[in-house]
Amino acid sequence: MDQYSLAELTELYFAAATLMDTQFQYWISVTFAVVIAGFFAGNRLTKNLSYLAAILYGLATFVLIARFTAAAGTVAMFGNAIVEAGVEMSRVGLPTRVLRYILFTTGTLAALYFLLRQRRSGGENG
């Protein structure tokens, strides 16, 4: 990382951290859309259509989590380079990333359950 100045490392660090937050926000938006769609259209969706929606949501979630993970690796790399340059910095680190992965997992499972349960229950909850 000697090819970058400290200012460039800091800028790259915050750009990657912003990308992490953006991916997380996209996932929240997509998950909310799935829950709302399941609530309003759950009893009108055919079995195949609800499974297709669940698969597409799962794939979108996978892509967003993969991009989040890549950005997290970049944040760690640039953060380590900044620390190696002699700058003390406070980083949120592992606990927050672990909590986000727990939220990704439980939120995704809950959204899928809600989407598929709405179809099976005939929309009784909507």
Image (cartoon, rainbow, N blue to C red):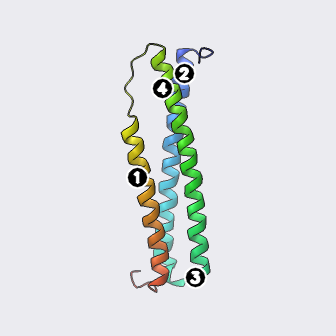
Q: Which mark is residue 24?
A: none
Question: In the figure, 4 relative to 66: above or below?
Answer: above
* Residue drawn at 47 percent across, 55 percent down: 28
Q: Which mark is residue 9?
A: 2
Q: Which mark is residue 79?
A: 4
Cα separation, mark 4 vs mark 2, equals 8 Å
Q: Amino acid at mark 1?
A: Ile
Q: Amino acid at mark 3?
A: Lys
First in sequence: mark 4 vs mark 3:
3
Residue, disc 1: 102
First in sequence: mark 2 vs mark 1:
2
x and y, in percent, of residue 55 in the image:
59, 67
First in sequence: mark 3 vs mark 1:
3
x and y, in percent, of residue 65 in the image:
53, 50
x and y, in percent, of residue 23 in the image:
53, 47
Nearer-the-camera pick, 9 or 96: 96
C-beta proximity under 8 Å, tags 4 and 3: no
| Other residues around mark 3 within 10 Å, as few (<14) / some (14–19) / many (≥20) | few
Q: Amino acid at mark 2?
A: Leu
Cα separation, mark 2 vs mark 1, equals 29 Å
Nearer-the-camera pick, 74 or 38: 74
Residue, disc 3: 47
Query: Which of the 4 image quarters holds residue 71?
Result: top right
C-beta proximity under 8 Å, tags 2 and 1: no
